[in-house]
Image (spheres, grey):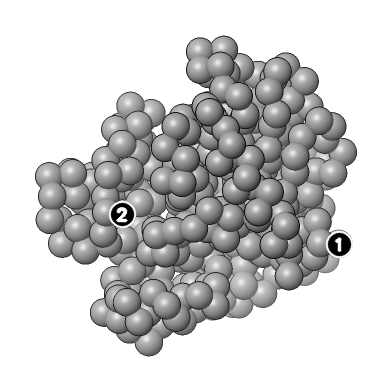
């Protein structure tokens, strides 16, 4: 058990009693679905998507607070919330997250499954679903999209047998089932320019059934599907290039790329790791003097390896045990690669 029934009830009560809640959510399926679930439960809610690449809530959100004057703020799937931000808000701040614990924050209502069980991996949309309810198919987009298969998937399997077939691991659902395609439609529509993402979010909010999207049954679904296809083409190019860096005799796959309209490192690293479960996969994209890396592995303790590798470099990062993100100054990338090789024992310490 991670969060208690009382915790879920508390989240529900706080949201139910709010007149104008503001929901700051991360720009991925888990964050976005968390927002959609809370918004369905409390239609007065106003959403603000992650501004910029980092998962930190800071001063950059104060203008949204000023403009909307909420009576309560929820941050959803945002890995850090700065004390300065909390102190500047005149209403309660509720943090719902499942990244590393931040127990030193003052003046917040904090909900993180790791509080009771340090090894818990329960995505934010899982917490939101248990707090305020579904629809179930929508909740599962966020939950499985964040690599977790909850026990209540059986209910969805009964309702939508053709979407899941016999798949029951996160990877096999994501890469080998029709439900996985729905997850990708959501995921890829959250990529790209802010204006495009905003309009996609509005369209996604109105989708009422998984088949509407998969079979493009409405004008909104057609637009979302076409944008998904566009990102998918670019994804396939990058993914195919990356596969050439997989070597049988090395535990490490280290791949960087420069030109891209979308940030797809996380997705590329994820699929490479799924198809090469014994390897540590590091995929990075250059942007303005820095490389933004995604690290994945099914067998290595990625978070430890990352923290040690970054120790003496101009860069920073963090995340989950098997899935992390980091940024490293361009000139330090060779050193970073070497440090990772040292940590996994390819070269001697
Ligand atoms: Mn998440």
Q: How far, Cα to Cα, is label 2 from label 1? A: 43 Å
Label 1, on which residue? 349
Instruction: Tell me: residue 230, above or below residue 123.
Output: above
Residue 140 percent coordinates (x, y): 44, 64
User: Which of the image's four quarters has the C terminus?
Assistant: bottom right
Q: Is residue 267 left or right of residue 332?
A: left
Query: Residue drawn at (26%, 79%), measured in percent from left and top?
Result: 162
Q: Is residue 191 left or right of residue 110?
A: left
In front here: 185 or 220?
Answer: 220
Label 2, on which residue? 185
Query: Residue drawn at (42%, 77%), measured in percent from left and top?
Result: 155
Query: Residue drawn at (48%, 65%), measured in percent from left and top?
Result: 144
Instruction: Tell me: residue 348, above or below residue 88.
Output: below
Residue 171 percent coordinates (x, y): 47, 73
Question: Any atom of ligand 1 within 8 Å of the CB at mark 1?
Answer: no
Instruction: Tell me: residue 280, above or below residue 328.
Output: below
Select label 2 or label 1 by which is in front: 2
């Amino acid at each position: 058990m991670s969060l208690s029934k009382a915790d879920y009830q508390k989240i529900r009560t706080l949201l139910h009693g709010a007149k104008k809640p503001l929901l700051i959510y991360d720009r991925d399926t888990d964050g976005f679905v968390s927002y959609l679930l809370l918004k369905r439960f409390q239609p007065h809610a106003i959403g603000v998507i992650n501004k910029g690449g980092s998962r930190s809530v800071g001063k950059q959100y104060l203008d949204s607070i000023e403009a909307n004057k909420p009576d309560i703020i929820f941050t959803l799937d945002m890995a850090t919330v700065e004390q300065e931000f909390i102190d500047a808000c005149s209403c309660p701040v509720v943090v719902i997250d499942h990244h590393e614990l931040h127990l030193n924050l003052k003046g917040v209502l904090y909900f993180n499954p790791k509080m009771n069980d340090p090894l818990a991996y329960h995505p934010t949309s899982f917490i939101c679903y248990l707090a305020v309810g579904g629809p179930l198919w929508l909740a599962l987009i966020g939950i499985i999209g964040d690599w977790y298969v909850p026990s209540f998937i059986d209910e969805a399997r009964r309702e939508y047998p053709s979407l899941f077939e016999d798949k029951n691991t996160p990877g096999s659902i994501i890469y080998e089932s029709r439900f996985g395609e729905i997850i990708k439609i959501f995921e890829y529509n959250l990529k790209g320019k802010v204006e495009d993402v905003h309009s996609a979010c509005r369209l996604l909010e109105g989708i009422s059934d998984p088949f509407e999207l998969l079979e493009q049954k409405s004008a909104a679904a057609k637009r979302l599907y076409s944008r998904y296809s566009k990102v998918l083409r670019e994804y396939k190019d990058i993914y195919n290039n990356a596969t050439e860096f997989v070597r049988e005799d090395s535990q490490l796959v280290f791949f960087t790329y420069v030109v891209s309209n979308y940030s797809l490192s996380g997705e590329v690293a994820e699929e490479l790791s799924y198809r090469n479960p014994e390897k540590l996969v590091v995929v990075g994209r250059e942007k303005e003097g820095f490389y933004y890396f995604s690290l994945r592995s099914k067998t290595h303790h990625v978070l430890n390896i990352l923290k040690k590798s970054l120790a003496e470099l101009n860069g920073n990062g963090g995340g989950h045990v098997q899935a992390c993100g980091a940024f490293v100054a361009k000139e330090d990338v060779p050193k970073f690669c070497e440090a990772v090789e040292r940590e996994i024992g390819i070269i001697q310490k």
